[in-house]
Amino acid sequence: MPTVYLDHWALNDIALNEELRKKFIQVMNENGGTFRLSVVNMTELSKQADRSQIDSILDMINSIFDCGLINIDPSEVIKKENILIDDLDSIAHVMNPSAELDFVSTYLMAHNYPTHWHVSEIIKTVIGELPSKRLTKSNEKFLEDMQNLLKIGRNDLSSLNRAKSRFHRLKKSGPKYQTATRELLQMAVGFVMRNQNMKMTQYSEWDDLFHLIVPVSYCDIVLLDRRWKTFINQTGFSFPDIAMVFDKRTIADCFKTISEWNLS
């Protein structure tokens, strides 16, 4: 059963287009797809001024039978992966490091543990209470670290050469562990560092890394911005080691892949 993640532009493009919305709901439900959403999706939803757009997006999410939340902070997910690597006998070994459990447990406790609930209800509750420090604190720390690293790296030839060498070494060796989280993080930072024409001065420009690294490591199908799809193609990694990635031009191919999932 495919797990699917949408970058926020894709969430809007699909949910706000009647034809695409109906098709996405259909292929997900008919093929048992799991739609995973993130804190960054919630944060960006809370910033949208048009309430009708938010309602349309929530309605689409609510129409998909199987939805879940994904923690897309690479630093937090890698920490959990390290626990599994260091202690294979730990109870944590049965848990998915990318699962976003805090919001779920808080919501269920606040509603006296209902027997029936949907992720759309959690998202609606959370975005209604933003701004929330829990939603942005770890993300902003990660983005600040990335900006500082980029500032140093782009002005140091030895750092640029190391980034290039690291990229090719990781491409040749492939993922070391079950997922490619740490490799994609290192390669993505190196990709931005070496492409000095990429403007990465705003937090919003770094948000794409959150839509990229963990979702591509833990999901089966991900819709990304075009430049990050290009980056994934350059890594040499492919499904099933990482997700199959699509962009705005290949949404139809994405839907076709979901619809044919059980056949393959």
Image (cartoon, rainbow, N blue to C red):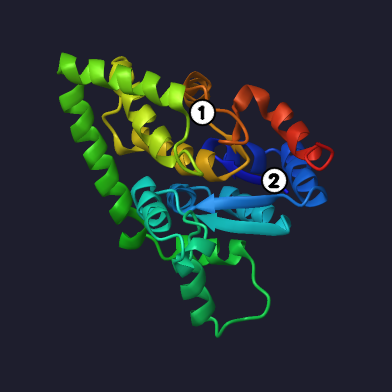
- Among the two numbered marks 2 and 1 on one chain, the one whose residue lies closer to the N terminus: 2
Q: Secondary structure at mark 2?
A: loop
Label ID, residue 154: none
- Can residue 94 be seen? yes
Image spot of residue 233 (x, y percent): 53, 21
Image spot of residue 199 (x, y percent): 31, 22
Dot in front, 2 or 1: 2
Residue at the image point whose x is 58% and y is 44% from the top: 219
Image spot of residue 33 (x, y percent): 72, 49
Residue at the image point whose x is 23% and y is 17% from the top: 160
Q: Is residue 240 left or right of residue 98?
A: right
User: Alpha-carbon neighbours of circle 2 within 10 Å: few (<14), some, or many (≥20)?
Assistant: some
The kind of residue on which mark 1 rests is: Asp
Is 139 located above or below residue 88 in the figure?
A: above
Image spot of residue 67 (x, y percent): 64, 57
Label ID, residue 225: 1
Task: Provide the residue designation for mark 2.
Answer: 2
